[in-house]
Structure formats: structure tokens, C-alpha cells
Image (cartoon, helix red, strand yellow):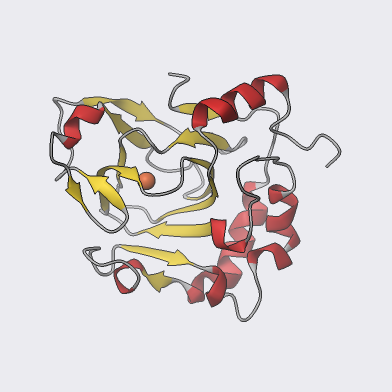
Amino acid sequence: MTIDRFVELTDVTYDMSALQNFYESVKHLAVDYSEIREKATGGLFSSIRVEDLDGKGYLDYPVISDLVNLFNPTAKAIRDGNIAITVYSPGFEFNPHIDFSRKSVIMFPILPHDGGVGVDYYDNAILGDQPIVSDYASMAPGHDDEFYLGTYNYSTRHPTLMNVSKVHGVRNDEQTRVYLQFSLYDEFSDCVDRVKSGEFFNKDK
Ligand SMILES: [Fe+2]
């Protein structure tokens, strides 16, 4: 897999079933993304945010904080506000885009059990000279074979570090797709260097 987009973090193994149990306990707290973000389509994408967790933060749950403590980013620590569980409804398409603000993300598939559809990646030229800029990303109108480079299927054993400053999107199938995400503000290439040197991980955890 192209190293400038994704790295499977084989130094870390996560317990998918523990995250599935956690998700079952908090899924009633999911907020429709269209209530958070203008231009998002109602009913297709929801997110469980820290302020929804019955007065607790993600870091109050060991199933989450134990994972957070594995990593050692430099630009910004992984706090409650950088953690989210995203829920894509069947058929949801997240159009090709570059993320706003965060540079990299650590992804943990929760559902479906095989991780579901992967992430599609595209040449940045899909955004054109004047990309449509929404409140959270530069976004293309939809999938386009001309710029499509391939699909990365996430491991359900190891988390994946992903470069979100390159264009990516998701075309969900008929299953609900649930992922835990940690947002990072380190450049992806810096993260990769630190993965290789081992500094990206807290070895004492
Ligand atoms: Fe994204």
C-alpha cells in the first residue's frame, strides 16, 4: 500500500469486540451530522461526540483511554475533542475530500465485523482549480473514475494511520459502518517517520 496515504500500525493490536460492546452502550447518543455541519445530508452520517456521553468524556472510558495512551503525537495530545465514533448509514457516500484542520487520523473499524467498505483515494486533481469548499473540507462532487487511484481496506486487528490531507472518500455498501477515530495534527510524513523509529508509540503502555 502506498506509504504516503496509509500505514497499518502493526505495533498495536486492538480488541474490536470490546469497541463493539462500547459502541452498543453509547450508540443511542449519536447525533445526526446534518445537525452539526451545514450541507451534510440528514440521516446518513452521525457522530458520537464527547458532549453526548452522558456528562463523561471518551477518556473516562478505559476501553478508549487505553488506546489513546498507546500513541505519542507531538503537535497536540489526543483529548476528548479529538476522538469520535462515526456512523455511516447504508448507502452513504462521503464524497472525495480533504479534511479541514486535522492532518492525520488513526482509524479503528468497529462495525461491520469485517470492517466494511474501505476508503477510496483519489488524485488531488479531482478537486479542480476551484474546489467546492464547505465548512469542513475541500470536496469534489462525487466519485470519479478518472481520478480514482484505489481503495484501502482497513485491518480489523491493527489500527491504521491515514493521511487526510490527500483526497479520500467512502462509498458505503448496505451495512452500517462504525469507526473510532483519533484526529492528529502532525503531518502524516512526520507520523510515518516516528512510526518507523518507534517514537510514535508509548512503549511503556
Ligand atoms: Fe475525511
**Residue visible at 65% across and 40% down in the picture:** 73
Q: State the image quarter where residue 47 is shown.
A: bottom left
* Residue farthest right in this picture: 204
Image coordinates of residue 2 in percent, x first then y, are 43, 18
- Location of the N terminus by quadrant is top left
- For residue 1, say whether it is visible: no
Q: Is residue 106 left or right of residue 96?
A: right
Q: Is residue 98 above or below residue 193?
A: below
In the image, residue 68 above or below residue 56: above
Q: Which residue is at a point 78% across and 38% down the rendered structure image?
A: 202
Determine which quarter of the picture holds residue 161.
top right
Q: Quadrant of the C terminus?
A: top right
Q: Residue 187 or 159: which is nearer the viewer?
A: 187
Q: Is residue 192 visible?
A: yes
The number of callouts visible is: 0
x and y, in percent, of residue 84 in the image: 52, 59
Report the residue at 51% width, 33% height from top: 187
Q: In screen coordinates, is 57 left or right of 179?
A: right
Percent position (x, y) of residue 65? Answer: 72, 56
State the image coordinates of residue 115 (x, y, percent, origin top left): 47, 42
* Farthest front residue in view: 75
